[in-house]
Amino acid sequence: MRCERVAIDGSMGEGGGQVLRSSLTLALVTGRSLNVENIRAGRKKPGLLRQHLSAVRAAAEVGQAEVRGGELGSQKIEFVPGAVVPGEYRFSIGSAGSATLVLQTVLPALLTASGPSKIVLEGGTHNPMAPPFEFLEKSFLPCVRRMGPRVEATLDRPGFYPAGGGAFAVAIEPVERLESFDLLERGKTTKKIARAIVANLPLDIGDRELEKVRELLTWDRRELCVEEFTDAAGSGNVLILELHGEHVTQVVTGFGERRASAHSVAERAVRELRRYLTSDIPVDEHLADQLLLPLALAKRGTFRTVRPSSHTRTNIDVIRSFLDIDVKLTEKAHDEFIIELQTNETAKHVKE
């Protein structure tokens, strides 16, 4: 029998902030106390940065938790959760740190809470090192809705590095129990969209990005659009390519940079989308990483994906520390894997 307190080495596997966030999520949904040491020990700036501390504080508020070690730079925390409380929350990072990652720390616990919730998050919404808002809205949340909850996200304004200042809201209608699902095929393509978001920059940047996309992918002009934001805290640009399938939507982003031309931003994004198009694998490495926790909480699920990243493998190790879940990785072909989650009781029954 497992003890109620879980000890996690924050330097395990990939060794970044995801170890902390996944551990906090699982502490909330299981009610088990948590000790995390060596938080981000291998990073240039080890310990809690502002976005990690925001995740700790958000989890503590949602789960009425006691926290020790919750300050900037800390490499060790103790987290003792209480009951998960649905309701209205506002979490502000105060920097360009990823607000989507803070959401993903508390979202799983609220999916099966005793009532609805609404969360407003402020900070970075379009960060090259984290899932951008459109990935959350178009790729991840539709998978969550297949599990029963109603979850809708609305972007108020984008937040780019270094100013941050973005904001979005998420409304959650929970269910008593998450339903599992399998995602083995994409299905036929139903829609294609290329969007260039431009915040406090000349609109022709987005026009040039989209013209290059049209040239390289031969998409119709009706599938291209520029969105302008003049109320953002700073300036920024992101190109978003959406490929909607029957069963899953792929979202590719290319970020504008000071010394990168609009054409080069578009070319990089198109190359990534073409890699996805040349295979029939439905789940890319980013979505694979995000599906693990909700499917583990549903106690079953299967999806077909690319070779698991270090993020994904680390997430699996953290899940196994909290839950009696068997996560099976089967290589079907070169860089093609089936990831199957099921309770160890189910796994034992299948083997017998």
Image (cartoon, rainbow, N blue to C red):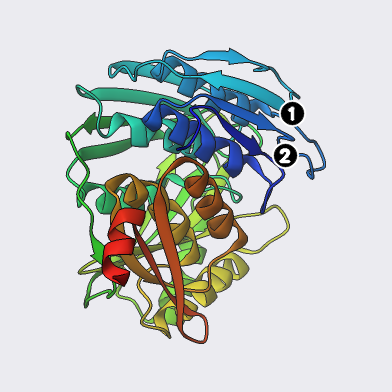
Badge 2: residue crowd in 10 Å (few <14, some 14–19, many ≥20): many
Q: Write the residue at 45% across / 38% down.
A: 1
Q: Height in image: 315 above or below 209?
A: above
Left or right: where 179 falls relative to 230:
left
Quadrant of residue 326 within the rendered picture: bottom left
Ranked by sequence position, the earlier of labels 2 and 1 is 2
Q: How many labels does the image show?
A: 2
Q: In the rendered structure, find residue 40 and report the number of the disc placed on it.
A: 2
Q: Is mark 1 on a helix, strand or loop?
A: loop
Q: Height in image: 150 above or below 292?
A: above
Q: Write the residue at 71% across / 26% down.
A: 76
Q: Is mark 2 on a helix, strand or loop?
A: loop
**Is the Cβ of the residue at disc 2 closer than 8 Å to that at disc 1?**
yes
Q: Height in image: 132 above or below 98?
A: below
Please state which amino acid type lies under the numbered disc 1: Gln
What is the distance, in whole Å, between disc 2 and disc 1 at their CAs?
7 Å
Left or right: where 46 falls relative to 310:
right
Q: Write the residue at 25% across / 65% down.
A: 182
Please state which amino acid type lies under the numbered disc 2: Arg
Frontmost residue, 214 versus 81: 81
Q: Height in image: 7 above or below 263?
A: above
Left or right: where 192 falls relative to 284:
left
Q: Which residue lies furthest to the right in this view?
A: 44
Q: Name the residue under label 1.
A: 75
Residue 251, percent from left and from top:
40, 61
Q: Write the residue at 61% across / 24% down.
A: 53
Residue 316, percent from left and from top:
51, 54
Residue 168 visible at all = no
Residue 274, percent from left and from top:
46, 80
